[in-house]
Image (spheres, rainbow, N blue to C red):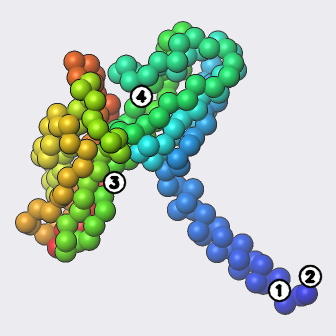
Amino acid sequence: MPPLSRPLVLLAALLGLALAVPTGQAAASTVTVGVANYAFTPSSVQVVMGGTVAWEFHGDHTTTSNQGFWNSGERTSGSFVHAFPDAGNFGYHCMMHPFMTGMVRVPMRAAGRPLAGYRLTWSVRSSTPASLRYDVQYKRSGATRWTSFRSATAQRSARFNPARSATYLVRARTRRVGGGASSWTAALHVVIR
Ligand SMILES: [Cu+2]
């Protein structure tokens, strides 16, 4: 390698690293979780709406949603794949070893601009099944109380453009009709001008 190219390689490596940090933190479309040694590894994962989680079994366990969204049943090998089209934080456990717990985080989305408002999306399904509904809340940054934006709605996205200029936090969760709800997503920050 010519000596002058070396700083360039270093620079490229540094730039690559800088670019890799946000990419690494962003939600992936497919994530693999190991089920072995009485643990889910990693125990908390994030996927984009519409992404999938594949649990790979090594030993006798289950992956079981805390709210009945999915249940692999007992498995000793192979993988169990589940899709996550809806926003929420979905806790789960192993039925045989309740101390084995995990979380799948599925963020909601906001697309838009401060002056034009945003389209919030909390599900990427093409239709909402009768068994599912969504809750969406917002609050101004610094406010203590959340305000309902949509409650038990079958809507999967909506425009968000409040009259008052502020930074707003928005969050969503998915509920099973007649059953439990996921935990709320992490708050998404949107600036309205
Ligand atoms: Cu187990």
- Label at residue 91: 4
Image quarter hosting the N terminus: bottom right
**Kind of residue indicated by mark 2:** Met
Q: Is residue 21 above or below residue 184?
A: below
Whichever of callouts 4 and 3 sits on the residue coming sooner in the sequence is 4
Residue placed under numbered mark 1 in the picture? 5
Q: Quadrant of residue 92?
A: top left
What residue appears at the point 43 percent right and 37 percent down from the top-left corner?
Answer: 84
Q: Are marks 4 and 1 in contact (CB under 8 Å)?
A: no
Whole-percent x, y for residue 32 in the image: 61, 37
Residue placed under numbered mark 3 in the picture? 109
Q: CA distance from mark 2 to mark 4?
A: 51 Å
SS label for mark 1: helix
SS label for mark 3: strand
Mark nearest the camera among 2 and 3 is 3
Whichever of callouts 4 and 1 sits on the residue coming sooner in the sequence is 1
Residue placed under numbered mark 2 in the picture? 1
Whichever of callouts 2 and 4 sits on the residue coming sooner in the sequence is 2
**Kind of residue indicated by mark 3:** Arg
